[in-house]
Each structure stands twice: as structure tokens, then as C-alpha cells.
Image: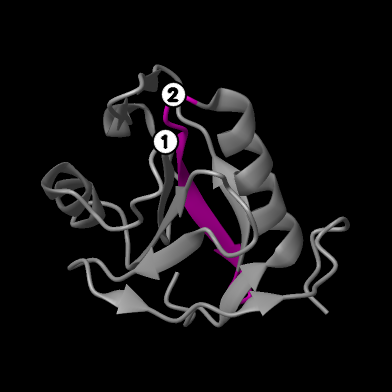
Amino acid sequence: MNTAIRGIARETLEFIMEVSRSTYPKEFAGLLQAKDGVITDILILPGTESSEVNAVLKLFMMPNMAAVGSVHSHPSSVIRPSRADLRLFSKTGNHHIIVGHPFGPDNWKCFSGNGEEISLEVLDVDIEDDEIL
């Protein structure tokens, strides 16, 4: 999949925040998938281990599907990648979202594969029928 990412669906970002709140104080982690250049889906890999310190994705469990990046929560309010985050980023695409406590609409950032903060627009799209308007 070579489509440029133009944003994330608002509904998907809200889902990320809700899951992050519900798993708090443990970290939540998943992989991002996109349709027509919009991040719409979160893939939760079997065997993902989560604690208050980190979440470990079992990348060998990934089905034959493309991921455009990763998402995970930081139970603290610090929203910047750690060294472990950067290692994951280098393996899983070019858009990586970190959300921080208290997991509100402004408690997130997107980073490139090398850890630089990048802009990611939140889009109001209809993803219920698997179609982007």
C-alpha cells in the first residue's frame, strides 16, 4: 500500500482514547491500518503484553496485512517516544500515534518512523460501511 496518509478518522481516534482510558494504568498498543489514505482501523495483535511500564507487540503474530504505523498509550502525560518506541517505529510504518493520560482530545501526537513529530489531520469520515467519503 503506497497511498499517502492524509489523516485519521475522528471515530478511530476516539476509539484509541477510549481503549487507552479503559486499560489505564496499563499501556495499550496496536497497529494502524488505512483505507484510501485515512487511518481507520486498529489491529490488536494476539499475545500483546501490557503493563504499567510498557506494551510489547508480538510482530511475528501479524497477519499478512499492511500496517501504516503503530499506536500506543503512555500512562503518564509525557507524549514523546522512548528508545523502545523508536525501535518499534522503525519496524511498523511511518505514522505512529502516542496518546497520554488523561486521554482527552488534545492528549496525542503523531510521529514519523524516525521519531519526529508530524502533523496528522483528524477527519470526519464515514467508516461504518468501510467507505471513505
Position of 118 with respect to 104 (left or right) is left
Relative to 46, residue 79 above or below: below
Q: Is residue 66 visible to the viewer in this orientation of the structure?
A: no
What residue appears at the point 52 percent right and 27 percent down from the top-left corner?
24
Residue 56 percent across, percent down from the top left: 29, 28
What residue appears at the point 63 percent right and 75 percent down from the top-left corner?
36
Counting residues from the start of the chain, the first of labels 1 and 2 encountered is 2
Q: Is residue 59 visible to the viewer in this orientation of the structure?
A: yes
Nearest to the observer: residue 82 or residue 59: 82
Q: Amino acid at mark 1?
A: Pro
* Label 2 Cα neighbours within 10 Å, binned few <14 / some 14-19 / many ≥20: some
What residue appears at the point 28 percent right and 58 percent down from the top-left corner?
80
Specify start and end residues of the magenta stretch as a single range.
Answer: 25-38
Residue 118 percent across, percent down from the top left: 37, 79
Q: Quadrant of the C terminus?
A: bottom right
The residue under label 1 is: 75
Residue 23 percent across, percent down from the top left: 55, 25
